[in-house]
Image (tube, rainbow, N blue to C red):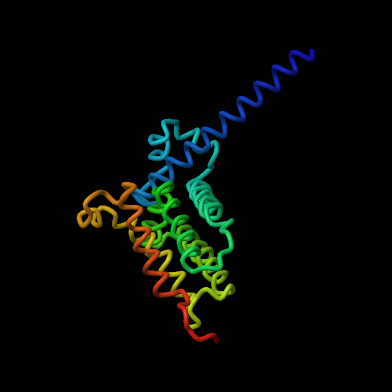
């Protein structure tokens, strides 16, 4: 009896792991479809075909497209929150911006489809994507506010627009990557060009937003 129970438990664990793998594969297929074709143009059948499963299996995990869109949104938000949740404290503007720029570059490099999804769907006016955009802005605003609280930013820094610029530069770059590639010696997603983008962005924000030696205090 004990052996049978043990075998049943093992089988149950395998099924659970398989379910999680199938669910993630379907979610990721939906994310790719939403990013490349748009949310409105991507059907349950399209997602199933991209994931290599039946439409029935998609609806087993996600009863309707709304549930699928919500799952994709939650996944993207989790990725973004995890990427920027543990930034260390810095007393130097150079160190602070370098760390932030490195995190942004790593996020774009590791999750380009997620970034493209938010960019494209926000431009399309998709309500779920607009909520993710708002969440991205909130994450950026929180990070910049933290730097301001440590007296690292200029006293006249407009935190609302700095946060907006931070997010829209990221989304716009990935959205327009094909056009941008024509102006670069290598594709944007090569390590050399990502590093160049990081350096240029760090300089842009550091020179425009951070306090300089001799700046008056408020």
Judge left or right: residue 205 versus residue 79: left
Rendered position, 117 above or below 49 = below
Residue 116, percent across and down? 38, 53
Q: Nearer the viewer, residue 45 or 88?
A: 88
Identify which residue is drawn at 45% across, 58% down: 129
Q: Position of residue 84 (x, y in %)?
A: 53, 57
Position of the C terminus by quadrant: bottom right
Q: Quadrant of residue 17?
A: top right
Q: Position of residue 124 (x, y in %)?
A: 36, 60
Q: Is residue 2 above or below residue 65?
A: above
Count the numbered circles shown. 0
- Which residue in the rendered view is the most extreme toward the right? 1
For the N terminus, the image quarter is top right
Q: Residue drawn at (39%, 44%), measured in percent from left and top?
A: 32
Q: Name above or below for residue 37 compared with residue 214.
A: above
Decide if residue 156 is on the left or right side of residue 11: left
- In the image, residue 40 lies at what x, y percent? 38, 52
Q: What residue is shown at x 54% (from left), y 42% (from top)? A: 63
* Camera-nearest residue between 128 and 214: 214
């Amino acid at each position: 009896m004990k052996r049978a129970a043990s075998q049943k438990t093992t089988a149950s664990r395998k099924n659970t792991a398989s379910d999680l793998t199938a669910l993630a594969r379907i979610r990721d297929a939906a994310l790719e479809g939403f990013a490349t074709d748009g949310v409105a143009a991507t059907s349950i059948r399209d997602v199933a075909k991209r994931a290599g499963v039946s439409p029935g299996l998609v609806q087993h995990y996600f009863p309707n497209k709304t549930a699928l869109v919500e799952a994709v949104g939650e996944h993207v938000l989790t990725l973004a929150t995890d990427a920027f949740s543990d930034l260390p404290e810095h007393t130097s503007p150079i160190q602070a911006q370098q760390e932030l720029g490195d995190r942004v570059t790593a996020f774009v490099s590791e999750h380009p489809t997620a970034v493209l999804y938010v960019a494209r769907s926000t431009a399309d006016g998709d309500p779920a994507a607009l909520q993710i955009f708002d969440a991205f802005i909130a994450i950026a605003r929180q990070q910049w506010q933290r730097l301001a609280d440590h007296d690292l930013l200029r006293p006249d820094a407009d935190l609302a627009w700095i946060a907006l610029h931070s997010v829209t530069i990221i989304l716009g770059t990935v959205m327009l990557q094909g056009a941008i590639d024509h102006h670069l010696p290598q594709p944007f997603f090569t390590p050399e060009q990502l590093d160049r983008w990081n350096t240029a962005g760090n300089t842009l924000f550091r020179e425009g937003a951070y306090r300089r030696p001799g700046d008056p205090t408020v």
